[in-house]
Amino acid sequence: MLSHFQAVVLGLLQGVSELFPISSLGHTVILPGLLGWAIDQNANDFLTFVVATHFATALVLLLAYGEDWARIVSGLLGLIGGRDSHPTNRYAKLGMLLIVGTIPAGAIGFLLQKRLERLFISPASAACFFTLNGGLLYAAECLRRKARSSEGLAGIDQHVAAKMCWWQAVKVGIAQILALLPGFSRTGSAIAGGLLVGLSHEEALRFSFLLATPIIGAAALLKLPMLIHSGSADAIENALAGGVSAAVTAFASIKILTRYFQTKTLTHFAIYCAAVGSLSLIILWK
């Protein structure tokens, strides 16, 4: 069972590592193993705690991009009601791209849920995937198409909608499947997929953040009722402490990353993941 201190530490870490392309699941699985924390990572209480911290991150993303989501939902409703024509409403198209991009990881995650959860009990496996995540990020930087930076963040959503087609959204969604493995980053895989289909760093980051909200929110809504029905006061307190901690660092992460990717690349994160993953693997296998 988690202590309140451990819940806060893991929550703070999750809020950073979920939005930075360095795998929140990887950190959550590896850190207790490195520190020798006696936590049953396959227990329902722990899995529900992880989902609660993810849900807090999704709420922060929803609030941070509230105006964007209002326009997207309005565009989709207009499209469904026949008030807007498909080609002219960029936000309607962006909404459809997000739906298409969510399907691959959502479907695989639902079908293989039990098998994937077994990986939570293996910090060594997570460290291995963490190292491979570094390779993925570096490969994305090396292989990506030449793409210009966005001309100002104010119109970045429309830039994404104008550049992407349905098949490209599917490719980003397929890349995001990797994040179902603890150690691979959802943000990193989505950004890598975005870069490879021709988006700039800023555009790939924005699409990744928008894509995170429905997929993280849907996963959380499936699991959180277990927390409520458990009746465990400690589990609920840990989930709240972890969720609040994750929300604080997630909000800061959005601000930092939005500025970072205006001029920087994924290379620094690739080096971090490869180095930390390799070192963790050596320590855990001793």
Image: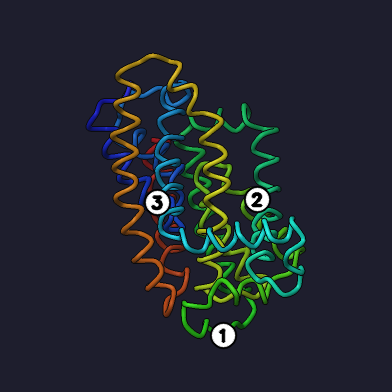
Q: Which label's residue is closer to the chain start, 3 or 1?
A: 3
Give the quadrant of the C terminus.
top left
* Mark 2 vs 1: CB contact within 8 A: no
Disc 2/disc 1 C-alpha distance (Å): 26 Å
Q: Nearer the viewer, residue 112 or 131?
A: 112
Which amino acid type is marked by label 1? Arg
Q: Which residue is mark 1?
A: 148
Q: Nearer the viewer, residue 286 or 204?
A: 204
* Quadrant hosting residue 253: bottom left
Relative horizontal placement of residue 241, taking residue 273 as reference (left or right): left
Disc 3/disc 1 C-alpha distance (Å): 29 Å
Q: How is the image coloured?
A: rainbow
Q: Which residue is mark 3?
A: 60
Question: Residue 54, image x and y in percent?
Answer: 44, 42
Which amino acid type is marked by label 3? Val
Q: Nearer the viewer, residue 93 or 46?
A: 93
Q: Residues within 10 Å of mark 3 (few under 14, many from 20)?
A: many
Question: Residue 223, image x and y in percent?
Answer: 52, 28
Q: Which label's residue is closer to the chain start, 2 or 1?
A: 2
Question: Residue 21, image x and y in percent?
Answer: 46, 58
Above or below 67: residue 250:
above
Q: Residues within 10 Å of mark 1 (few under 14, many from 20)?
A: few
Above or below 153: residue 32:
above
Residue displayed at 52% across by 42% down: 217
Q: Residues within 10 Å of mark 2 (few under 14, many from 20)?
A: many
Q: Which residue is mark 2?
A: 102
Residue displayed at 73% across by 61% down: 79
Disc 3/disc 2 C-alpha distance (Å): 19 Å
Which amino acid type is marked by label 2? Thr
Which numbered mark, 3 or 2, is in the foreground of this view? 3
Question: In what element is the residue under mark 1?
Answer: loop
